[in-house]
């Protein structure tokens, strides 16, 4: 057992504390009885050191009083780990997941959900006002998720023959023979997989499928992958569920062994007859991305469907779709509302992905033009539009800064409204410059990173005023948050 000074709050945070010894001793400092005062970016909580510098702490909640061992020492701040808790915050709750604090996926499970929402909204507002320096209207309260667990429609698990060992296992001195894992990468360790017994992110039968696949593979000597040595057979498992009740399972194999492959796939099909799409990939290359690989349908269809207001969206193994279906619907409704469409507008949907937003708003627009860099996504968008009998959308593929040009606008028309939903890096400066060059009446900016959104809003501020803003929580128990901003052209 661990000594009293390492006893944690109910979140089992001691799992993180033993990393402190890895840092160079001459750079480590220890601070006693520090009050945690805030939550910051990337799930870190914030305290102040005696010298006035900020301390970012990964395993504490605002309101905790802790001893902190620093792990990084920078000119303007420290990073550290709470090693002893003197007082526990009233914002704390007992995390339900047995893997919490080791997994790294749901960093905020130990914080009550209403407080998670408070800090997410606060981060968005701070980024827009402090980084973007834009004037905000009255902020619409963040929209929380009704489901705070079991909300994801897609999960990906990795196989490993050399799983991550807990500190308890390491300290025991025993030879650990059971080294196979099917789970998640340990943060910052590309070759170590934490074996997951129960995950609280995806609805049944996700846990049952994962655990059954692992047990069957072990019982039938189907070798798990070794990332360092690039050997083994079982590489990854992807499970997708949908609001229509369909289930997709994809097994990625590193090498072909028809007998063992069919043995496993037949077992999955028989054990889980509710699976509507069972597929596999043979991927012998150095990384496990499947976007350049052939996906083979073993049983059922090669796709599943999502549905939203009567619109159906075909999802294949490579498709992008928002991973929280219920909150995606709410996000799109806010986007459509902010766009203020009357039926006469030409709308450009930049970074359209598979065209979900474009098709969702099409009924209220004269025409929607979608642009996206991924060719497969545009093919999905066109197919979904045909299947939904939507005739007022057009989709084009290419690098946004190269496609979205004056010539493109001359050919397709001057947009009345631009909807933009860029990746985490935000919009390229050339795209922002093009928007300023054409000055549409309204812009709706959907962002998964309010810091880069703030940067772009600052560039637009001379010409546009923020009239509405609302954060949407797509990922409860994490620090991630989406934000939607409506900008109106200044007169």
Image (cartoon, rainbow, N blue to C red):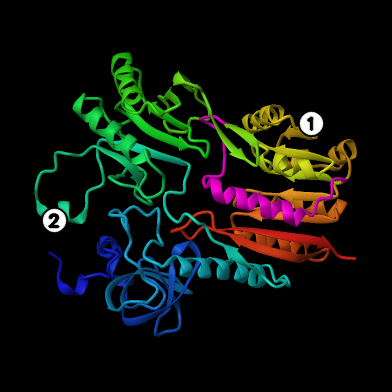
Mark 1: secondary structure:
loop
**Residue drawn at (50%, 38%) of the image:** 242
Q: Per the image, is 234 magenta? A: no
Q: Quadrant of the C terminus?
A: bottom right
Q: Which residue is mark 1?
A: 391
Q: Position of residue 272 (x, y in %)?
A: 35, 28
**Vertical placement of residue 261 versus 140, above or below:** above
Q: Which residue is mark 2?
A: 171
**Residue drawn at (28%, 31%) of the image:** 224
Q: Who is closer to the viewer here, 448 or 269?
A: 269
Q: Who is closer to the viewer here, 170 or 105?
A: 105
Magenta stretch?
315-344
**Residue drawn at (10%, 44%) of the image:** 175
Quick check: 166 left or right of 157? left
User: Is there any visible trace of residue 105 in the rendered image?
Assistant: yes
Q: Residues within 10 Å of mark 1 (few under 14, many from 20)?
A: few
Q: Quadrant of the N terminus?
A: bottom left
Residue found at the very far top of the displayed protein: 259
Q: Per the image, is 326 magenta? A: yes
Q: Position of residue 379 (x, y in %)?
A: 66, 28
Q: Who is closer to the viewer here, 451 or 268?
A: 268
Rounded to the nearest angstrom, the CA distance separating label 2 from label 1 is 65 Å
**Residue drawn at (82%, 66%) of the image:** 462
């Amino acid at each position: 057992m661990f000594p009293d000074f390492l006893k944690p709050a109910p979140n089992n945070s001691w799992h993180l504390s033993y990393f402190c010894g890895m840092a160079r001793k001459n750079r480590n400092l220890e601070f006693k009885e520090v009050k945690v005062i805030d939550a910051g970016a990337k799930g870190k909580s914030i305290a102040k050191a005696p010298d006035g510098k900020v301390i970012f702490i990964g395993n504490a909640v605002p309101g905790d009083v802790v001893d902190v061992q620093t792990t990084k020492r920078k000119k303007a701040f420290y990073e550290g780990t709470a090693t002893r808790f003197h007082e526990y915050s009233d914002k704390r709750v007992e995390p339900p997941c047995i893997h919490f604090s080791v997994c790294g996926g749901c960093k905020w499970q130990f914080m009550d959900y209403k407080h998670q929402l408070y800090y997410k909204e606060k981060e968005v507002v701070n980024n827009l006002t402090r980084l973007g320096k834009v004037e905000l209207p009255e902020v619409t309260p963040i929209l929380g998720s009704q489901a705070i667990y079991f909300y994801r429609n897609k999960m990906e698990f990795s196989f490993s023959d050399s799983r991550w060992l807990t500190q308890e296992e390491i300290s025991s001195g025993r030879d650990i023979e059971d080294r196979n894992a099917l789970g998640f990468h340990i943060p910052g360790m590309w070759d170590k997989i934490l074996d997951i017994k129960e995950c609280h992110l995806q609805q049944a039968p996700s846990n049952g499928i994962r655990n059954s696949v692992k047990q069957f593979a072990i019982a039938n000597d189907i070798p798990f992958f070794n990332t360092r040595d690039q050997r083994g057979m079982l590489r990854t498992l992807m499970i997708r569920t949908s609001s229509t009740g369909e289930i997709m399972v994809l097994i990625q194999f590193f090498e072909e062994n028809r007998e063992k492959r069919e043995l496993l796939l037949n077992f999955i099909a028989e054990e889980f007859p509710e699976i509507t799409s069972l597929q596999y990939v043979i991927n012998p290359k150095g990384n496990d991305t499947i976007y350049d690989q052939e996906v083979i349908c073993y049983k059922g269809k090669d796709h599943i469907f999502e549905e939203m207001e009567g619109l159906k969206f075909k999802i294949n193994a490579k498709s992008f779709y928002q991973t929280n279906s219920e909150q995606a619907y709410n996000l799109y409704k806010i986007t459509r509302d902010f766009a203020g469409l009357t039926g006469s507008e030409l709308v450009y949907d930049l970074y359209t992905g598979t065209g979900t937003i474009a098709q969702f708003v099409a009924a209220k627009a004269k025409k929607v033009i979608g642009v996206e860099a991924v060719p497969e996504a545009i093919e999905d968008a066109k197919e979904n539009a045909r299947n939904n009998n939507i005739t007022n959308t057009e989709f084009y593929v290419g690098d946004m800064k190269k496609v979205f040009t004056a010539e493109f606008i001359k050919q397709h028309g001057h947009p009345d409204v631009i909807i933009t939903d860029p990746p985490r890096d935000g919009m390229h400066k050339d795209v922002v410059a093009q928007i300023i060059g054409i000055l549409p009446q309204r812009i709706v900016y959907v962002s998964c990173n309010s810091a880069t959104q703030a940067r772009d809003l600052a560039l637009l501020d001379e010409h546009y005023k923020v009239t509405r803003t609302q954060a949407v929580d797509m990922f409860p128990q994490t620090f991630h948050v989406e934000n939607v901003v409506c900008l109106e052209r200044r007169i």
